[in-house]
Amino acid sequence: MKTFGDRWLYGLLIGVATCLAVGVVMTAFPTVAMAQEEAAETPAEEAAAVEEAADPLAAYIAENDYAINTLIMFICAVFVLFMQAGFAMVEIGLNSAKNAVNILAKNVMDLSVGVILYLFVGFNLMYPGDGWVVDGWLGGISPFVVESEGTGYGDYSSYADFLFQVAFAATAATIVSGAVAGRMKFSAYLVYSAILTGLIYPISGSWKWGAGYFDAMGFQDFAGSVVVHAVGGFAGLAGAIFLGPRIGRFTNEGKSVPIPGHNISFAALGVFILWVGWYGFNPGSQLTYAGAANANATTYIALTTTLAAAAGAVTALITGWVLFGKPDVTMALNGVLGGLVAITANCDRVSQVESLIIGVVGGLLVVLGILLLEKLKIDDPVGAWPVHGLNGVWGGLATGIFGDLPDGIESVGSFFTVQLISTVAICAWAFITMSIVFGVLKGIGMLRVSPEVEQAGLDLHEHGLRAYPLGADQ
């Protein structure tokens, strides 16, 4: 009996120990046990569990994409802002030394005034979201940049987005500076600049980039041949017409008398700065850069941009050489810019051969546009309208001829029609509205300096400064 009792006691103790051991194991690994049990019962729930486990990786990837997109957009914004220096150098180099300070002041202030007006009015007017006042045509006005909330905001920071977009607005404004150089009052220039960056440019910009009426039609303008450059070019044309030519630019018989720029080195440096800055302008408009597909698209845009610029320079130089008997470097410099403007609308959707063709036509249009202005007795000291206005139109139309068809458009003819209607409407908007502005300024005697001030130079009379030592400012 004793032996039996001992065996019974040992068995009981072993059983209790075994149960305790199993309990401890189950307590230590409940998730594994439950997952295995649930997997056995519901395969769909197992897939959901795996997806939930992958969420941290997806969040990590999204956060890194957001950071890459934001930082590269910021760098591109800096490139575009630096284009202001390029515009200043081109304009100074192609104008008289006695107006250099005035030109610098205009370029500093159209950027500075533009930033403030775009912050308070232009940015949200151009990108109204659901806040349209007149659907597809006029957005609402609200100040400041909407706060970024990390990756919840979108693909990139709203702050970087503002910096990028305001640089484009400043570009549209400063294009006009070259067309009105040497005879426009500084105060009038500030008024014009505020109106363009605060109202005129954002309203027409919203028609495309703000998801407005022309965007719904299928209008394509990747980085702004029409939205930015043609707007600035046609605003500049209006200014040049209302101001009239510089004293001595045309004889009483209407013969053209060129007024040479005082420093071609500055002009060449400015064009090189603009060319480099365009790599922020065009590739930056890809907006998202993370991932292999975006990286390839961004660098392909840089390739087509480069090809068009080079083709424009070669064509303009050769055309000028044939017509005038000398290889004029200023024609080549403007040919670079004409090619860049023309490719800006379509750099994402044309082939390499097509980008060369677009640049060739752009270079040719620069030379022909300069000759056309001379025939019409319109004084544009730097060729702002041939470069930005005429080639802005060509860029918009070339997109309809060569560009890949966007979704919803079935034929090249339909696409070209959309491009034509949208381009003409935006150019007409800029020309008509800015004609009203310049006409009012002229009517109240605020537009043009006196003949005495113009002949002496705007630097000393408008700003009280000289850019060069006395006697070197002619």
Image: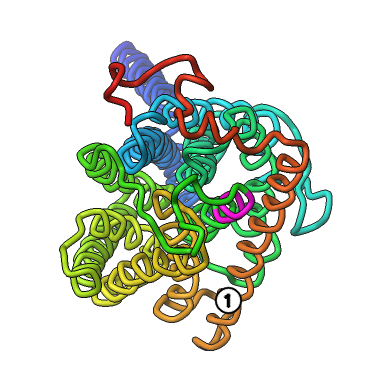
Quarter of the image where one finds residue 29: top left
Q: Which residues are magenta?
A: 237-242
Q: Which colour scheme appears in the figure?
A: rainbow
Q: Secondary structure at mark 1?
A: helix
Q: Which image quadrant: the N terminus?
A: top left
Question: Residue at the location (61% across, 30% down)?
Answer: 190
Question: Where does residue 272 sit, x and y in percent of width and height?
Answer: 23, 44
Answer whether residue 241 is magenta in the image: yes
- The residue indicated by pointer 1 is 420
Q: Which image quadrant: the C terminus?
A: top left
| 169 horizontally vs 75: left or right | right
Residue 402 position (above or below residue 18) = below
Q: Main secondary structure of the magenta part?
A: helix
Answer whether residue 140 is magenta in the image: no
Residue 74 position (above or below residue 138) = above
Residue 270 position (above or below residue 423) = above
Question: Where does residue 189 sit, x and y in percent of width and height?
Answer: 59, 34
Question: Where does residue 49 sit, x and y in percent of width and height?
Answer: 47, 44
Q: Badge 1: few (under 14), some or many (20 or more) residues near its Cα, within 10 Å? A: some
Question: Residue at the location (63% across, 28% down)?
Answer: 187
- Residue 187 visible: yes
Question: Residue at the location (54% across, 34% down)?
Answer: 162
